[in-house]
Image: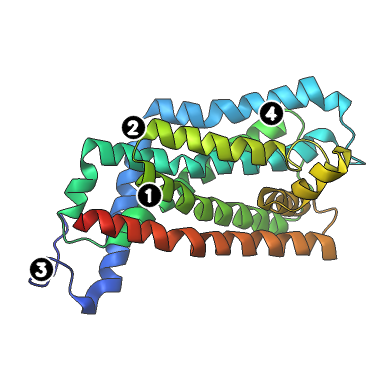
Amino acid sequence: MITFSATSDGRPASRGRIRWLLVDTFVLTRRNVITYLRSPEEIMSATIQPILFVLLFRYVFGGAINTDGATYVNYLMAGIFVQTATFLSMATGNGLARDIQTGLMDRFRSLPMSSPAVLAGRALATLLRSLVVIVVMVAVGVAVGFRPQGSPLLLLAAAGVLLLFVFALSWLGLLLGLLLRNPEAVQMMSMSLVFPLTFLSSAFVPTRTMPVWLRVFADHQPMTYVMDAVRSLVLGVSIGPHGWSAVSWAVGISIATVLVFAPPAVSRYRHMAIS
């Protein structure tokens, strides 16, 4: 049981604000992880769809796609990792919208707890959930012929880039959840954003096969940078200036995403608290 040292208006004393932010974030992350583990249908939905994508592209389309040296399954898995992580990140808003509808957010707002911690706890829980699902996807990929070729250090760097991207996009999902407040609406909006960006990228085919006007967009949209970075690190075959440039872009995009979407998400939550 956590107790709070609060001022007369019910808010934590400023002296211990950072401490309470960390404590509240830990408690809420734990709460969200436990909720996820008690929902088998969420675990199934998070893993079945990417597995189907792997099998579909590996065995149905893979034989018709030329990836210039790398086996198609090795090329494919980086796109699957980023696509899966993106879907999980955006789904963060679904859970938040459900909490709003069930009145849990009203309970949180009545407690002397840190406002950013409510959102950060959910974003960190999504990070842990994504890590587990990505491990499962690596196992599935290995089962169908995926063979990582990067060094252990490069593989850790790939995981770091991917998880940073997950954390960044989670804030976009949280902002959508706070704005729409309806799980179905959040899911529809997320799908409308993620599907076009996934397929108009280097996820499943090299962008050189696209028309010039479409290739320009595909080569310079955020998900392609992240996919190329993860692919370069996992395969360990093009870590030169181009490979590290892709990594730098991926990290920069993720940090920028947090800076763009986290402040308005926290502001929106605080506005709800006084509305």
- The structure's colour scheme is rainbow
What residue sits right under mark 2 in the picture?
Answer: 38
Residue 196 image offset from top left, x and y in percent? 65, 37
Earlier in the chain: of badge 2 and badge 4, it is: 2
At 35% across and 51% down in the image, what residue appears? 29
Element at label 4 = helix
Mark nearer the viewer, 3 or 4: 3
Residue 185: image quadrant is: top left
Residue that lies at the very extreme toward the right in this rendered image: 69
Q: Which residue is mark 4?
A: 54
Numbered disc in front, either 2 or 1: 1
Q: Nearer the viewer, mark 3 or mark 2?
A: 3
| For residue 45, above or below residue 199 | above
Local crowd size for mark 4, using a 10 Å CA cut-off: few (<14), some (14–19), many (≥20) = many
Kindly identify the residue that appears in the image at 87 percent across and 25 percent down: 64
In the structure shown, which secondary structural element does the residue marked by tag 3 occupy? loop
Label at residue 9: 3
Q: Residue furthest left?
A: 8
Marker disc for residue 122: 1
- Say if residue 240 shows up in the picture: no
Q: CA distance from mark 1 to mark 4?
A: 28 Å
